[in-house]
Image (cartoon, rainbow, N blue to C red):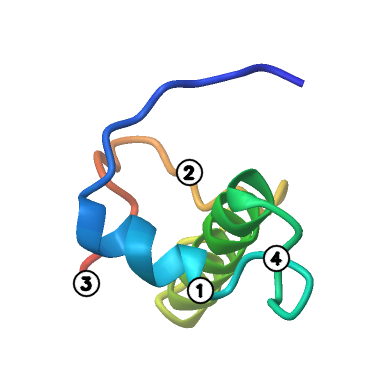
Amino acid sequence: MPKISVEIPQELLDDLDEHVGDDGKFVNRSDGVRASIRKTLDLLDEIDERHGRLTDDGTGSEAGSETGTDE
């Protein structure tokens, strides 16, 4: 699995940490970040589908589209 490095505001890390651990929703920060990315991408796909922007492969990429969202 590739590793990436990102800068995240402390406020977001503090909020994420409240959901990490034995009593939390995620086993570690990485798990929480991956789940959040998946959720965001699913929401963007739903928006693209409502606006008729999904391609046959379901990526939401269309020729001439720069961002893929209006939101």
Which quadrant of the figure contains the C terminus? bottom left
Residue 53 in the image, given as x and y percentages of width and height: 45, 62
Q: CA distance from mark 4 to mark 1?
A: 26 Å
Q: Nearer the viewer, mark 3 or mark 4?
A: 4
Q: CA distance from mark 3 to mark 2?
A: 16 Å
Of pointers 3 and 1, the one earlier in the residue sequence:
1
What crowding class fits label 1: few (fewer than 14 Cα within 10 Å), some (14-19), or many (20 or more)? few
Q: Secondary structure at mark 4?
A: loop
Q: Nearer the viewer, mark 4 or mark 1?
A: 4
At 74% from the left and 80% from the top, the residue drawn is 23
Of pointers 4 and 2, the one earlier in the residue sequence:
4
Q: Amino acid at mark 3?
A: Glu
Residue 26 in the image, given as x and y percentages of width and height: 71, 65
Q: CA distance from mark 2 to mark 1?
A: 15 Å
What crowding class fits label 3: few (fewer than 14 Cα within 10 Å), some (14-19), or many (20 or more)? few
Residue 15 is drawn in which quadrant? Answer: bottom left
Q: Which residue is mark 3?
A: 71
Q: Which residue is mark 2?
A: 61
Q: Amino acid at mark 1?
A: Leu
At 24% from the left and 39% from the top, the residue drawn is 66
Q: Amino acid at mark 4?
A: Gly
In the rendered view, tell whether residue 6 sits above or below residue 9: above
Q: How many marks?
A: 4
Q: Which residue is mark 4?
A: 21
Residue 57: which numbered mark, if any? none
Q: Nearer the viewer, mark 2 or mark 1?
A: 1
Q: Secondary structure at mark 1?
A: helix
